[in-house]
Amino acid sequence: MKLYCVGCGPGDPELLTVRAVNLIRGAEVIFAPTAREGKPSIALSVVEQYVDKAAKAVSLVFPMVKDRESLKDYWRRNADEIASAVRSGKKVVYLTVGDPALYSTWIYIHRELKKSHPDVEVEIVPGVASMFAIANKAKISLAEGDETVAIVPACYDMERVKRTANACDTVIFLKDGRYFDNVISMLGEAGFPDDASIAIAQDVDSEGEILEMTTLADQRGRKGPTEKYFSIMVAKKKSARQQQQQ
């Protein structure tokens, strides 16, 4: 009775690990998260070319709400359904975008499985996270030497974000791109100079990818290119020229 959790990477089917592809091809039941009933799963769409036609694909709803009590009901029901499939003796795979250990739905499923279904053995297969995908697309480093890096999942508490940005050399902003314009306005107050390097991307390594390289001064005052949830911005205090001189 074993469950395989597979990280699907940022969106390009060719960025899956060999282990991930082999597990998906051999799966009899594939579970994938979605934000609401009837909405196609992004994770499943990434790997669909590797899915056997005889495999059963099941979308599990993980609503994008902040009420943890209502979310716990979804986590519990989803974990129960997965555990039931594993106990049936079938080869079961759970998919998640990016890497399972970074802001993924898998974290909550795994917690429920350990609590309510300890007999279900788990194997986790890592995936390429979007921060590494944008770094390679933009040909930038995320950190070198003694530089520090912060990962900010959302920009609701701007004072907290400002304190984080002030203390770090590189800040990676994930998720909702609609907040990035507010972040640009704040970065100067957090010690980022006008020539600080800014990389902004949406749907990285997917169809319709947007990628812009700019500076804080050039981005300030103009609307950014990202409007979707799956967006990412990397802000580096050092300018591109300073990085080249190192």
Image (spheres, rainbow, N blue to C red):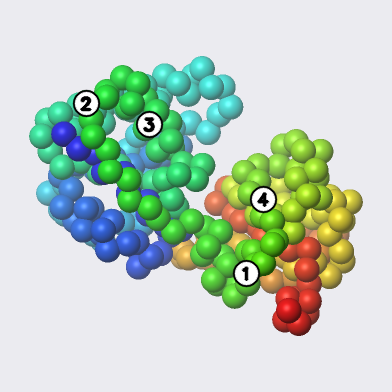
Q: Nearer the viewer, residue 92 or 41?
A: 92
Where is residue 8 drawn, in percent x and y? 37, 54
Q: Name the side, left or right, on which 144 lies relative to 124.
A: right
Q: Earlier in the sequence, mark 1 or mark 4?
A: 1
Image: 81 above or below 4: above
Q: Earlier in the sequence, mark 4 or mark 3?
A: 3
Instruction: Tell me the distance, in whole angstroms, between the alpha carbons under discs 2 and 4.
Output: 36 Å
Where is residue 201 drawn, in percent x and y? 61, 62
Asked if labels 3 and 4 touch by Cβ distance under 8 angstroms, the answer is no
Q: Tell me the residue at 50%/45% (across/down).
A: 102
Q: Is residue 75 visible?
A: yes
Badge 2 is on which residue? 119
Image disc number at residue 150: 4
Q: Secondary structure at mark 1?
A: loop
Image: 34 above or below 25: above
Instruction: Tell me the distance, in whole angstroms, between the alpha carbons under discs 4 and 3.
Output: 25 Å
Q: Earlier in the sequence, mark 2 or mark 4?
A: 2
> How dense is the environment of label 3, judged by Cα within 10 Å: few (below 14), some, or many (20 and up)?
many
Q: Secondary structure at mark 4?
A: strand
Instruction: Tell me the distance, in whole angstroms, between the alpha carbons under discs 1 and 4.
Output: 14 Å
